[in-house]
C-alpha cells in the first residue's frame, strides 16, 4: 500500500513570461529555409530542454562564424551586446529578438543615462549574460557591482543612473542603493527587478516553511533555480535539487508527510509533468494550489 504524502506545487512553477515568449519565437523561427534555428549559447539554462530542442533543429553555437549567411539567429531572453546584432546583420543573418521585454527596458534605461550624462551603474553579476547585454548598451564607462563592499569603494559621482539585474535579490539591492546614494550627488534609480521572479521566490519561501521536504526542479546551470534552492536551504527545510525525474530517490521521502515542488523560470512543463508522475509513483494525494 502507498504511503500518503501530500505534494504541493508552487503556483509559480514552470516558464516565466520571458522564457515562454522566447520559446514561442523559437517555434516561429523554425520556419527558416534550412530548418535550423541558431542560438548563441544555450537558449535557456535547462540542459534536458536544450537537448530536446537540438533534436528539433535548434543549434547552439558559440560565435557568428559558425552560422552561414541567411541563417536565423534567435537572441535569448537575456539579450545580447548590440555590437553582436550589428555584426550579425552585416553578415546577412536574420535576427529573431527574444530578449525579454523586462531586459529590453533595462537596456533602454541605460541608453537614456548616456543622453542625460549620467554614469550607468548596474547592480548585478558581471558574468551573467543579462548584465553583459545591458552593459553593452550602457557605454564604455559602465560600473557593475553586486556587493555592499563594492558600493562602499565607489568614488563620489556627480550624476549616475542605476538599474538592477532582473533576478537580483531585492533586500540586497536596496542595501547597495542606500550606500550608493551617499556618494552620488544626483542618482536616478530604476527598479528593474522582475516581479515574476520575486513572486516565485516569495511563493517558494512560503511553501518551504510548511512542508517537510522541498523539491527544486531546474537546470543546474540556472542561477535563478540555484537561488530558489539556497532560499529553501536557508529556511532549514530538507531540500533536494533535481534536473529530471530520474534523479528522484524514493529514499528521500522516509518520514516525509508533505513535499513542496518549485521550479526555476526555465523549467519546461514536460519535466514538471514527469517529476509529478514520479512523485505520484512514490506518494499520492497531490494538491494543486
Ligand atoms: Fe523576463 Fe523575468 Fe523571466 S526578466 S526572462 S520574465 S525572469
Image: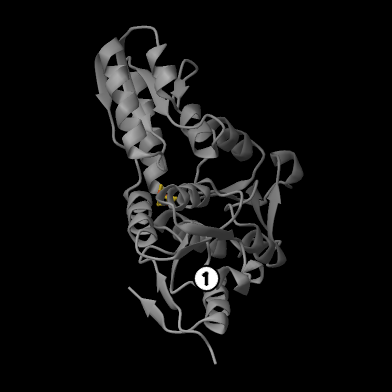
Which residue occupies 38% across, 39% down? Answer: 169
Residue 49 picture location, percent across and down: 62, 63
The residue labelled by disc 1 is 272
Residue 133 picture location, percent across and down: 51, 34
Q: Quadrant of the N terminus?
A: bottom right
Q: Total label count?
A: 1
Which residue occupies 40% across, 58% down? Answer: 17
Classify 10 Å Cα crowding around label 1: few (below 14), some (14-19), many (20 and above): many
Residue 238 picture location, percent across and down: 49, 59
Left/right of residue 246 with respect to residue 15 in the rendered view:
right
Would residue 94 be visible to someone looking at this image? Answer: yes
Does dot 1 land on a helix, a strand or a loop? helix
In the current view of this chain or complex, which residue is farthest to the front?
255
- Vertical placement of residue 267 versus 72, above or below: below
Residue 91 picture location, percent across and down: 67, 39
- Vertical placement of residue 121 versus 237, above or below: above
Left/right of residue 93 with respect to residue 129 in the rendered view:
right
Which residue occupies 60% across, 39% down? Answer: 89
Who is closer to the viewer here, 191 or 263?
Answer: 263
- Vertical placement of residue 139 versus 274, above or below: above
Amino acid at each position: 500500500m502507498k504511503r500518503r504524502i501530500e505534494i504541493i506545487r508552487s503556483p509559480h512553477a514552470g516558464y516565466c513570461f520571458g522564457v515562454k515568449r522566447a520559446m514561442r519565437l523559437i517555434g516561429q523561427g523554425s520556419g527558416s529555409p534550412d530548418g535550423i534555428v541558431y542560438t548563441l549559447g544555450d537558449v535557456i539554462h535547462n540542459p534536458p530542454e536544450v537537448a530536446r530542442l537540438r533534436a528539433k533543429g535548434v543549434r547552439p553555437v558559440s560565435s557568428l562564424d559558425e552560422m552561414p549567411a541567411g541563417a536565423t539567429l534567435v537572441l535569448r531572453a537575456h539579450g545580447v551586446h548590440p555590437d553582436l546584432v550589428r555584426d550579425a546583420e552585416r553578415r546577412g543573418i536574420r535576427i529573431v529578438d527574444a530578449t525579454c521585454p523586462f531586459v529590453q527596458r533595462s537596456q533602454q534605461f541605460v541608453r537614456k543615462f548616456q543622453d542625460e550624462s549620467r554614469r550607468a551603474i548596474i547592480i548585478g553579476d558581471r558574468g551573467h549574460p543579462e548584465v553583459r547585454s545591458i552593459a553593452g548598451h550602457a557605454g564604455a564607462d559602465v560600473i557593475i557591482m553586486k556587493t555592499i563592499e563594492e558600493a562602499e569603494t565607489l568614488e563620489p559621482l556627480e550624476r549616475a543612473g542605476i538599474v538592477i539585474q532582473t533576478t537580483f535579490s531585492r533586500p540586497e539591492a536596496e542595501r547597495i542603493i542606500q550606500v550608493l546614494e551617499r556618494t552620488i550627488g544626483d542618482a536616478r534609480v530604476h527598479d528593474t527587478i522582475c516581479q515574476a521572479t520575486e513572486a516565485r521566490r516569495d511563493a517558494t519561501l512560503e511553501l518551504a516553511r510548511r512542508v517537510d521536504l522541498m523539491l527544486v526542479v531546474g537546470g543546474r546551470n540556472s542561477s535563478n533555480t540555484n537561488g530558489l534552492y539556497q532560499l529553501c536551504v536557508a529556511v532549514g527545510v530538507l531540500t533536494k535539487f533535481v534536473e529530471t525525474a530520474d534523479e528522484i530517490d524514493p529514499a528521500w521521502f522516509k518520514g516525509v508527510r508533505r513535499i513542496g515542488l518549485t521550479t526555476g523560470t526555465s523549467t519546461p512543463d514536460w519535466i514538471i509533468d514527469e517529476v509529478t508522475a514520479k512523485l505520484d509513483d512514490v506518494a499520492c494525494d497531490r494538491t494543486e494550489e
